[in-house]
Image (spheres, rainbow, N blue to C red):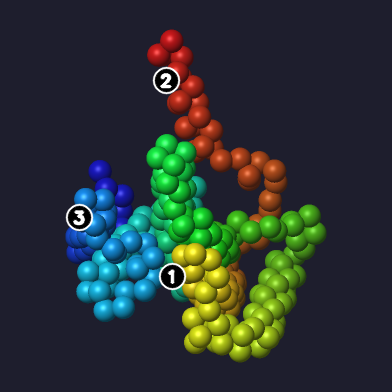
Amino acid sequence: MSSPSVWLGSARQPVRLLMIGFGAATALLVGGLAFSNAFLGSEIGMHQMLRPEGRLIVYITLAAVLGAVFFASVYLSDTVGAIESEPSGFFDIVSLICARLSMIALPLIVVVMFYEVISRYVFASGTLWANELSLWLAGFLFLLAGLYAMQQRSHIRIYIIYDMMPRWMQKLSDCISVFLIWVFTICLFWGGYNEAKAKFLRMETFGTAWDPPIPATIKPAIIFMIILVAIQALSNLISDWNKAPEHHSPADEIDETEIENIRRTLDLSEEDK
C-alpha cells in the first residue's frame, strides 16, 4: 500500500512515471556506453562525460541522469519517514527535495567506491575518476545534509537554559538565533561571492588526471546552500511561532521505531535458530 501524498497530490503518479522513464533511459544509455567501451572500442568514457565536445550521446546521457535524479528526488520528497517530522513551514518542501538528493548521493558513492575496489583489486585496473567522483558527491551530500538537519530541527541544540525560559523568552531566543544565522549568511556571501563567481566562470578544475570542476561547483554551492539554510531557519521560526512551549529530556532522543525494528530483527534471528 502506498503512503499518502505529502504535497504532490494528483501530480504524484506523473512524477513517478517520469522518474521511471528517466531511470530506464539512464540505465540503457549507461549500459550501452559501457558495452561499447568494453567490446566495440568506443572512446567515450568518464573523461569524456566531463568534456562532451559535441558528442550528442554524452549530452543525452547527462540529461537522462539529471532527469532521473531530479524526478526521483521530487517523488521521494512526497513521503515522510517514520522518524521524520511533517513539513509545516513554507520552505520545507524545497528542503525535503534537497534531502532526497543527498539520500540518493549516498548509495551512488557506495556504488562508485565498490566499482573502484573491484576494478583495482580483482582486475588490477584501477580508475582515474572514482576517488574524485566520490569526493565530488560527498561535498554536495554534506551541504545538502546540513539543510535537511535544519528542516528536521536535528542540528545541535542545547536546551538546559532554553527549557527554563517562559514562552516569550524562548521566542526571543529563537529570533536572536535566526538573526545570527542571517548575519553569518550575509558575511559569508559578502566575503565569498567574488571568489565563487571567479571559480565558476573560469570553471576551475581539481588538477588531477580526470580533472573534474570540483572547486568551480563546490564553492558556489557552499554560498547557495547557506542561503537555503538561512531561509529554512526563518521558515522554522515562522512555523514554530504559535506552538506550545517545548520541554526536552534524554528520552526524546530515543527512536522507538528503530528500537522496534531491532527487536523484530532479533526475534526473526531467534526463530531462524
Residue 32, position as x, y percentages in the image: 21, 56
Q: Estimate how packed mark 1 is, as few (under 14), some (14 to 19) or many (20 or more) residues with alpha carbons within 10 Å.
A: some
Q: Closest to the observer: 121 or 133?
A: 121
Give the residue displayed 46% in from the left and 57% down from the top.
Answer: 128
- Mark 3: amino acid: Leu
Residue 157, position as x, y percentages in the image: 70, 58
Give the residue displayed 64% in from the left and 83% down from the top.
Answer: 192
Would residue 163 be seen by someone viewing this image from the given angle? no
Give the residue displayed 55% in from the left and 82% down from the top.
Answer: 199
Mark 2: which secondary structure?
Answer: helix
Mark 1: which secondary structure?
Answer: helix
- Which residue carries the number 3 mark? 40
Q: CA distance from mark 2 to mark 1?
A: 39 Å
In the rendered image, which quarter contains the C terminus?
top left
Is residue 171 rendered to the left or right of residue 79? right
Residue 250, position as x, y percentages in the image: 70, 43
- Mark 1: amino acid: Val
Q: Earlier in the sequence, mark 3 or mark 2?
A: 3
